[in-house]
């Protein structure tokens, strides 16, 4: 039996950098591969990861965090399938949980697009919301979503989720409504709420 030796080794970027690339630019292929990797990491490392095993691990994680996983139907890792469903409450709970996690908060928030600055929000929210919103966009035909964090005039950090379904107007009209709602929310003083 001949011994084996490595001819070359290539290490990927850290997971935080891979996730940032995925979230900032909506790299759907990364999402598909990460769900499989999550499944492989949790299972026997010698096995091949799968979307099904990744879904199981995600459900187990949500349950461990106290976030009801029954508000999530996940068909794929990219979010492009019409068979994916997530409630606004689930997304809000997940964002709140990540904010409370001091270990992961920094890398997670840094991975989100910044309004008027980079990623999928680089050309959006360039006025009053510029750099005050960090959020992930979601888009498929007749579905538009925005979920993340926003900072009020008083410096308070808010968690928000907005989802529009079955609309018959252009995407830009839906974006304008979401952005107007955020502007109003961020201008509201604590005494007005």
Image (cartoon, grey):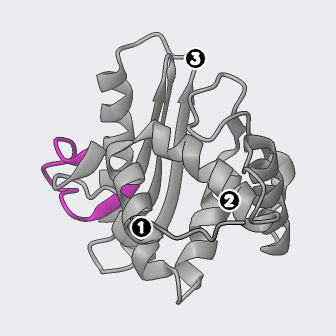
Alpha carbon of mark 3 to alpha carbon of mark 1: how far?
48 Å
Magenta stretch?
121-135
Q: In the rendered view, does 112 fall on the left or right side of 32?
A: left
Q: Secondary structure at mark 1?
A: loop
Rendering coords of residue 5 (x, y %): 52, 70
Alpha carbon of mark 2 to alpha carbon of mark 1: how far?
22 Å
Q: Secondary structure at mark 3?
A: loop
Q: Quadrant of the N terminus?
A: bottom right
Residue in front for this viewpoint, 191 or 108: 108
Magenta span contains residue 122: yes
Magenta stretch, main secondary structure, is loop
Residue bearing mark 2: 38
Q: Is residue 185 visible?
A: no
Q: Is the residue marked by circle 1 packed among few (<14), some (14-19), or many (20+) residues within 10 Å?
A: few
Residue bearing mark 1: 9
Q: Residue furthest front?
A: 1
Q: Secondary structure at mark 2?
A: helix
In the rendered image, which quarter is residue 18 located in? bottom left
Q: Earlier in the sequence, mark 2 or mark 1?
A: 1
Q: In the rendered view, does 28 fall on the left or right side of 184?
A: right
Residue bearing mark 3: 166
Q: In the rendered view, does 162 fall on the left or right side of 23?
A: right
């Amino acid at each position: 039996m001949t011994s084996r030796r490595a001819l070359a080794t290539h290490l990927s970027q850290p997971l935080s950098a891979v996730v940032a690339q995925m979230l900032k630019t909506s790299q759907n292929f990364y999402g598909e591969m990460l769900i499989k990797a999550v499944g492989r990491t949790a299972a026997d490392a010698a096995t091949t990861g799968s979307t099904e095993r990744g879904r199981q691990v995600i459900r187990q994680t949500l349950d461990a965090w106290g976030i009801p996983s029954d508000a999530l139907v996940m068909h794929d890792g990219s979010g492009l399938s019409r068979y994916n469903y997530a409630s606004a409450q689930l997304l809000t709970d997940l964002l709140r949980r990540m904010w409370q996690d001091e270990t992961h908060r920094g890398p997670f928030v840094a991975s989100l697009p910044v309004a008027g600055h980079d990623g999928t929000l680089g050309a959006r929210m360039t006025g009053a919301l510029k750099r005050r919103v960090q959020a992930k966009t979601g888009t498929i035909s007749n579905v538009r979503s925005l979920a993340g964090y926003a900072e009020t005039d008083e410096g308070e950090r808010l968690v928000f989720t907005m989802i529009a379904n079955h609309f018959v107007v252009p995407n830009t009209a839906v974006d304008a409504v979401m952005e107007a709602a955020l502007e109003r929310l961020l201008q509201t003083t604590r005494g007005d709420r």
